[in-house]
Image (tube, coloured by chain):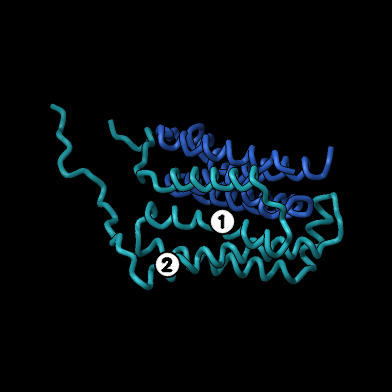
Chain colours: A blue, B cyan
Amino acid sequence: MSQTLLGIALVILSSAIEGFAQVCLKKSTIQSMRKLHWLGVGIAFFIVEALLYTIALQWLQLSTAYILGSLSFVAVTIFSSLMLNEKADLERWAGLGLILVGCTLVTIQK
Amino acid sequence: MRQTETGQTPAPTHHTHGLTRGLASGLALAVILDTAGQLLWKFAVERLPDNLSLWSTIEAAAQQPWFLAVIAVFLCQLFVWLKVVENVDLSFAQPITSLSYLTVCGFSWMMFDDQIGFTKGAGILCVLAGVWIISRGKRQTHTDAGTRT
């Protein structure tokens, strides 16, 4: 696997982790119990995300990595639907669609 | 008898939507710091020896003072951002920060010789539009858990 592909995979993974971490932070603000638990998990995952992104930046152009980071919007939508029961409206799906198309285009060009 | 919902609407954080000079500079500063943080991050990474493992990257990054600058810039950015959203609706402020997709790509094209052709340029604009649409959306909570029975 080329380093570019590995870098892309790492940014996708770190975006997924960011989505999860964001939802953990949100949970820490709305749950009456175990607030610190969710806050701690959220911050820990943010640190992991930053480390993975740092490794990915070794192999990717910054413009590619930064744009692919917008996939965290997709991850936030998925995790907040699973963990918070939030429903995305049509407008949000349209935005997510544009992000997915954009990330594909950015990845296609070497 | 079921009680009617009287005046149960959550107090809207009603802020001005006018762009005052202070707010404009706050938003500009947020975008600038975000961009600077990303560029510094890449700059710092380029000064790391080639690594594959997670641990050796952590070790090398801990000894690389540029990473402290990255952290400092992002802390400043967080501070500025909190000040901005204290004074204005999030749905007004957040779409504007998506401009950093343009500035980061523009500067990394200039500073790091990133290749941005037609395909990638179109992709960047798609992402910018998508993030804009999402972040300007209504700030209502659709959580089922929040509704009372």
Count numbered badges in the picture. 2
Question: Residue A61 appears at what percent x and percent y?
Answer: 72, 53
Q: Residue B94, can we see it?
A: yes
Name the image quarter holding residue B94.
bottom left
User: What element does badge 1 sit on?
Assistant: helix
Question: Residue B144 appears at what percent x and percent y?
Answer: 37, 33
Question: Residue A78 appears at what percent x and percent y?
Answer: 53, 34
Q: At 69% across and 41% down in the image, what residue appears? A: A107
Out of A41 and A68, give the one closest to the viewer.
A68
User: What element does badge 2 sit on?
Assistant: helix
Indicate the amino acid at tag 2. Lys
Disc assigned to residue B83: 2
Indicate the amino acid at tag 1. Leu
Against B143, is B53 above or below? Answer: below
Please state if A18 lies on the left or on the right of A81 as rendered.
Answer: right
Out of B101 and B114, give the one closest to the viewer.
B114
Against A65, is B109 above or below? Answer: below
Alpha carbon separation for disc pair 1 and 2: 23 Å
Disc assigned to residue B102: 1
Q: Are marks 1 and 2 on the same chain?
A: yes
Name the image quarter holding residue A102.
top right
Please state if A49 lies on the left or on the right of B148 as rendered.
Answer: right
Out of B104 and B57, give the one closest to the viewer.
B104
